[in-house]
Structure formats: structure tokens, C-alpha cells
Image (cartoon, coloured by chain):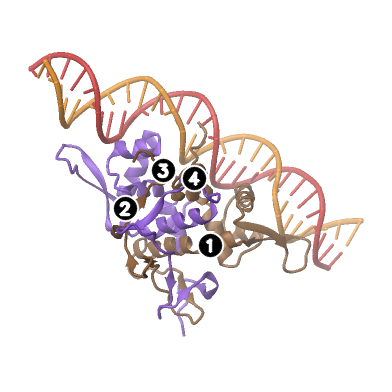
Chain colours: A brown, B purple, C red, D orange
Amino acid sequence: MKRTGFSEAECPVARALDAIGDWWSLLIVRDAFDGLRRFGDFQKNLGIAKGMLSTRLRKLVELDVLELVPASDGSAYQEYALTRRGRDLFPVIVGLRQWGEAHLYARGEAHSDLVDQAGQPVGQLVLPSRTGRPLTWSDTKVRKAGARKR
Amino acid sequence: MKRTGFSEAECPVARALDAIGDWWSLLIVRDAFDGLRRFGDFQKNLGIAKGMLSTRLRKLVELDVLELVPASDGSAYQEYALTRRGRDLFPVIVGLRQWGEAHLYARGEAHSDLVDQAGQPVGQLVLPSRTGRPLTWSDTKVRKAGARKR
DNA sequence: GCTGTCTAGTCCTATTTTAGAACCAAGGTT
DNA sequence: AACCTTGGTTCTAAAATAGGACTAGACAGC
């Protein structure tokens, strides 16, 4: 009765969810985008049990989403920093944010906002075709990798 | 020891993950994007336990991500169809897909592909500024709820 | 209309995961 | 040296998951 895994799936969505699709991982990554780097900072900000956090951070380091680097304040401690692979999760976090903003808040209810350096709200994520035309879900389809049932 | 929840969070990422951030929900939504509509189809395609699937589908219907509609083949059964809210998850699924493609496959390893109606691979997701300039994570920051620009 | 099969579930149990608190060791502070 | 902070590990109880047994209603063949 092992938890089902998708690390071998041919579908990249399934593999991605297998890697970072659990309860906490994306919240940790979100916090990392917000500048958090220390074990205690994550723990306090998320209210996560320390055991969970320890397990999750270890897995994220294994996955090369985070890496351990010497503390920036010169102490002997270490910090967790986003790697390239971690930073590439930015569109996923933004997608979740925009969906949440659009559908999970009552009118007028306050939420945090993503803004650019000038303080301007950002636009919506766009999926461009090869020629630059914006695509919606009905413009696309999934082409299967090999010969497999659908 | 109730499972931690974020349905009241001021951060839209946290609320989104609270709603659809569990193990199975996004995979069900992905399958719905691929055209699956029936209980048995989801069950067979995902290999998910029927009890799990039943719970998840009920929650997704409650959330108004899916809705029950009469079966398209005229039978007395019902089907699960994506709502507007469900279709709006498209960028999230695409983001996960593109991250998975980029980081979780060995060179040359086969995976399914997202293509447009002409069969052309789609481009990368883009986050535009209000003026249309593409933004990366380092161009943006999160403004906490309630903080209004002076 | 009777029988058998398919569909879409529910219910039950064993196992795994999570939450939360207690404990601990090394680093830093006074 | 004594004490607090940081970053964990270990323990237990509760909750979630996997998987199988079971069931009610739909449908197909006779």
C-alpha cells in the first residue's frame, strides 16, 4: 500500500507532481521566492512541524530545487537557496497565484499581490504558439510520446 | 492533529494549494483537459483507488472545478465536465508540464508533448508586465495584502 | 421479464503519512 | 561557564491513502 508514484510517467505533469506536488513543497518554494532562506524562517512562517520541514527540505535539496549554501551573515549555519531548477518553478507559482486570486476570494477580500519593480500589478500568464499567438486550452492537445492507451 | 489548512490564507498561492494542491486533484484535472469525463475512465487511466477518486471528484465538484452533466452518449449516467473555473487551471497544468519536461527527463527520454492544432509545439509560458514586457522572478515582488501604493 | 454484466460508486481494513510535542547537540552570546 | 538559539531527530496519535470486498441501479441479450 505504498503511496502511488509517478516518477516514471511519460506525462511531464505527472512527474512534476510526483516531485513537488505534495502538500508543502510548493509552499516552501513560494517562501523561497519571497526571500526566506533559513530553516527557522520557513518553520515559523509556514507553521509546519519541524519533522515535516526537515523531510521536505531534504527532498527538495535532493531534487536540486534548493541547495545548501553558507549563511549569508557569516555564521557557521547554512541556508537554503533556490537553484536554477527551483527558480524555473516561478511560472507554476504564478499560475497558482493567479488562479487563487481569480477564484478563491470574495469580492473586496484582501490578498497579497504580485507586482513588478515599479509596483505595477503584473499581467496574466500567456501561453504563446510558436508564432507568438496566445493559446488557450482549446487551441492545444497532448501528443502522446509512444504507443500507449488513451 | 487535523491536517493543516490554508483556506483562510491571505496568500493566493496558499489558498490555491489548499483547494487543489493534493496528490490527485491536478492529475484528475489534467485528465479532464485530455478529454476524460467518466468515473471509470479516470479510475482506469490514473490507477487510483475508487474511494480516493470518489472523494476527490466530490471535492472538485464542490469547488466548482468540475460539474456533473448528463452523459454525452444519451445513457442515464453522468459525466464530469470542466467548468470555467476548471479551465482556468490550464496555465497551472502547462507550467507543471513545462517544468517537468525541462528538468525531470533524461536527454532523449520520451515524453508526451503539448502542441497546437497545427501540431506545432507550443512556446514557454510568459508573464508579461502591464506594458507587455516579459518578466522573470527577479523582476517581481509580492506586495502584502492591505498595503496600498501611496 | 429474467439473467448477467457494466458502471459508479460505498465500506472496511492495513499501511503510510502528517502533526505536534519532547528531546538533543552544536553554535553563538553574555 | 551558563544560557539561549538554531537546526534538527525521535516519538506517538490522528488522519489520509491503497486496495479489495461489496452493492445498487443501468443496460444488453434472450
Q: Residue furthest bottom?
A: B150
Label 1: how many Cα within 10 Å (few below 14, some 14–19, many 20+): some
Describe the element under mark 1 as helix, strand or loop: loop
Is residue B96 at least partly visible in the picture?
yes
Residue labelled with disc 2: B65
> What is the distance, in whole Å, between disc 3 and disc 2 at their CAs?
30 Å
Residue labelled with disc 4: B2
Label 3: how many Cα within 10 Å (few below 14, some 14–19, many 20+): few
Label 4: how many Cα within 10 Å (few below 14, some 14–19, many 20+): few
Residue B27 or residue D22, whichever sits in front: B27
Q: Which residue: 41% across, 53% down?
A: B113
Is B28 drawn above or below residue A47 in the view shown? above
Q: Chain of mark 3?
A: A
Q: Are the residues flagged by discs 4 and 3 from a single subunit?
A: no
Label 2: how many Cα within 10 Å (few below 14, some 14–19, many 20+): many
Residue labelled with disc 3: A146
> What is the distance, in whole Å, between disc 2 and disc 1 at their CAs?
26 Å
Describe the element under mark 3 as helix, strand or loop: loop
Q: Chain of mark 2?
A: B
x, y percent for residue A60: 60, 52
Question: Mark 1 belongs to which amino acid?
Answer: Asp
